[in-house]
Image (spheres, grey):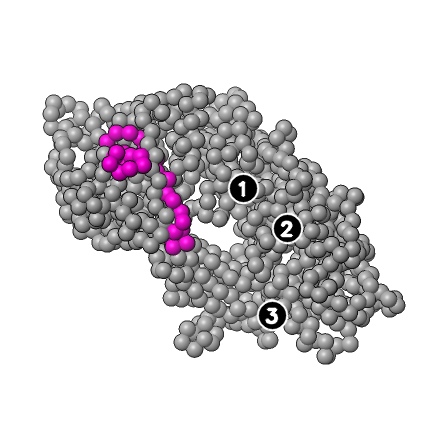
Amino acid sequence: MKKSNTKISRQIFKNLFALLAGIIFLLASCQDRLDTPVPAPQPTGGEVTLHLALSTPIHVTPTTKAIDPEHQIGAIKMLVFLKETDSYQYQYMVDGQHLQTDDNNHTRFDVKLKVTPKDILFLIYANYGDAFETYEPEAGTSVANVKKAVIASYTSDIAGNLPMYAEIEHTGGLLVNAIELRTVLLRAVARVDVAKNLSADSSPFSLTDIYIYRTQSKIQLAPDTEHLVEGTLRVQAASVPEASQPDTDNPLIQSAADEGVEIIDKIYIPESEAVASTRPMDATCIVVGGYFDEDAEKSYYRIDFTTETGDTSIGQVLRNHKYRFNIKKVLIRGYETPDEAATNGTSHITVEMKSWEDFTTEMYFNGDSYLGISARSVTMRYYAGSERELFIQSSVPYTISWKDPATGEFTESPVTVSPSVDIAQLCERSFYDAAIVKDLNGQGDLIQVFFYPHGANHDATNRVDEFQIESGSWKFTVTVTQETFRKYAGRTIRVLSGSGIGGLGHLFATTTDALPLRNILDNTAYFSPSGTVPISGFSFTAVDNTNMRYTAGTASQQHFRNILYASDVLVLTYDNQLSADAARDIAAWISEGKNRVLIVNGDTHTSSAHLLRNNAGFLGLLMGQINWWYYTNVGGGSFNVDNIGGNYKIPQPTANTAEFFNGLFGKVTPGVEIARPDIYAGYAKSWGTTVYPLLVPSNNPAYLSLGVNKATGIIFSAEGQLYQSGRMSATAASSGVITSDFDRLIANLWVWIVERVVREE
């Protein structure tokens, strides 16, 4: 049970002790009592009868409502620990008796325990399988060791018998016969749903099967204490038993019952630990099976579990979480077998993963009245658009009020909420807005509070605010935080470049063609833990053309993919003559990772053809239906574009490009011209709605010379020599110091690149 809940309940216990002959001890709980009455307790000499009410977590996602099998409890075992000096030690275990379950997620049962004056800790296990067939703790065993030892075997038919766990600390001993405990159970497994939600530019795809590879063989029913977020029942890492092994031979398979299904769901699996993205064969993963376009044979595509901890690891599965994978786009035919897909990296499919925890409350409870919250803190990421939410569950009216920073009192913007009245109210704070609305799922006693930051936090510290939820003597204080970008001071951005004009080189800046840009990126005053952009810095790796001319299934492909998938940013030059298989791998890499950036540098018609024309226009598709044109003042012909000569020019900023024109490296002056390096260049004549121009021809601003697709993370340049001296300043070329408007524009663009990499992790 949550330690913070214990403190609340302990206070209630102290208040009621002086008033009541019987003790009612209440913790985070279910929302209603059972209709079936519990018989009055009878004295039993040296024993005390304990009545317990359990509630399983409540679903609060807009896509899923409560499902009966997820709440069923068939067996309960309670382990009793007594406090000896400063730690709890195991004493004995008892089975739950007289189980009564209603259809509203609530189970009630009785146990008989020995009278004691000591503080007690209870570990409650529900649907524990074979965990106690051969295991019973020795008296005096610590809580941590018991948790690690209570292990059940995992079977694929676990639905309807999901293992669960709760922990309750009770002070003051067991001295009377009228004690009631209430708590919320934590599920020991995760749920996986895979849905088809194709975008307009996807090829047709029919979903038929889901395979989950390398699921663990054992379940540790209670999480390790060190893996819990302090003061909560939320886990931040997996607790995998040492005796557990991933099943490498027999994937879990769930097939669609009928043709044309849009979702395959309710797949329950144990926790798995995260592994490095360079070790795909060690990670728990999903393989999607189905028919691509009009194919007669099935194709198979791998998708990975990703983390929310700011790294690029894969395969982490956490208990009490739901993972919903929405298939957004299928690019080309997949692998021929599920095993082949499972042993390779994710490819050729674009998937959006959403994970959430079931709603576990910290709650005051008194008779039929209750007031609870889903968390005591809300943390938004540093960037604008980092939405977060909080849930408040109550049967009584309450007031939400914000802290006055001048007085420290909770007197600002009070909002009164009643369970019986709809509400939709916006509260504006210094760095965020809070929207208070009735539960979107229609659960009558539930309020959702959504938090939206006003903008990115580039301050040296986190931004912090507080508000209070109050009903009578019940009070919850909630802390709202927006993280500072400086939390990423240890993050290195890994840049992979192709060789040729526009590449950023390898190791040392002197080896690169784009020396001014490389010097700016290497300048520790700009990009370092103490710099303008507080990251560890950049690491640069280069590959030559021969590394990208491979065919599928070769060692060269595996070598390039290993480097590619370990990179955050890929820079392609017009000298890079990609094979069709390399093009497909790059297309898959950029489309699968929201935290990746692809930079494409073009130039003449002939040279750019290696990059754009020879690979079925794959980059054009990803960049938003780019229509490329080319310019030269020699020879005329179809490659000329009228009235497009002259220099380049910085256009007027728009709402979608403001961050590039007024960013961390200062304001950029519109209309400034950038010298053309030679008579050759490529241009975009038309482009998709998510592509935004940063540079245009001075004679014809209807064309595009440098643009960014903020949706896909692709930056494309018509001129591969933009980052050389002559376009960027001489001081940037010599010392990496930003002095010109174009320097500032490109530096602000790299701020966006860095933030895209870290913000989506």
Q: Which residue is mark 1?
A: 274
Q: Amino acid at mark 1?
A: Ala
Front label number (3 vs 2): 2
Q: Please indicate, yes or no, whether residue 685 appears anywhere in the rendered image.
A: no
Q: Amino acid at mark 2?
A: Pro
Q: Is residue 679 above or below residue 382?
A: above
Classed neighbour count for the residue bearing mark 3: other residues with Cα under 10 Å, few (<14), some (14–19), many (≥20): some
Q: Amino acid at mark 3?
A: Val
Counting labels gives 3
Q: Secondary structure at mark 2?
A: loop
At numbered mark 3, what does the secondary structure look like: helix, strand or loop? Answer: loop
Give the extent of the magenta segment. 485-512
The residue drawn where x is 17% and y is 46% is 731
Question: Residue drawn at (63%, 43%), measured in percent from left and top?
Answer: 240
Nearest to the eye among marks 1 and 3: give it. Answer: 1
Q: Which mark is residue 396?
A: 3
Whether residue 391 is situated above or below residue 274 in the rendered picture: below
- Determine the residue positioned at 19% across, 42% down: 733
Please tell me which of labels 2 and 1 falls first in the chain: 2
Q: CA distance from mark 2 to mark 1?
A: 16 Å
Question: Are there few (<14), some (14-19), or many (20+) residues within 10 Å of tag 1?
Answer: many
Choose between 221 and 361: the one closer to the eye.
221
Q: Could you tell me how far apart the alpha carbons at marks 3 and 2 are, in whole angstroms?
A: 33 Å
- The residue where tag 2 is placed is 223
Left or right for 669, reference 290: left
Residue 121 percent across, percent down from the top left = 71, 61
Q: Would residue 422 appear left or right of 404 to someone viewing this image?
A: right
Quadrant in which residue 433 is drawn = bottom left
Q: What percent of the width, then of the height, locates residue 270?
A: 63, 42
Can residue 469 be seen here? Answer: yes
Percent of width and height locating residue 477:
53, 68
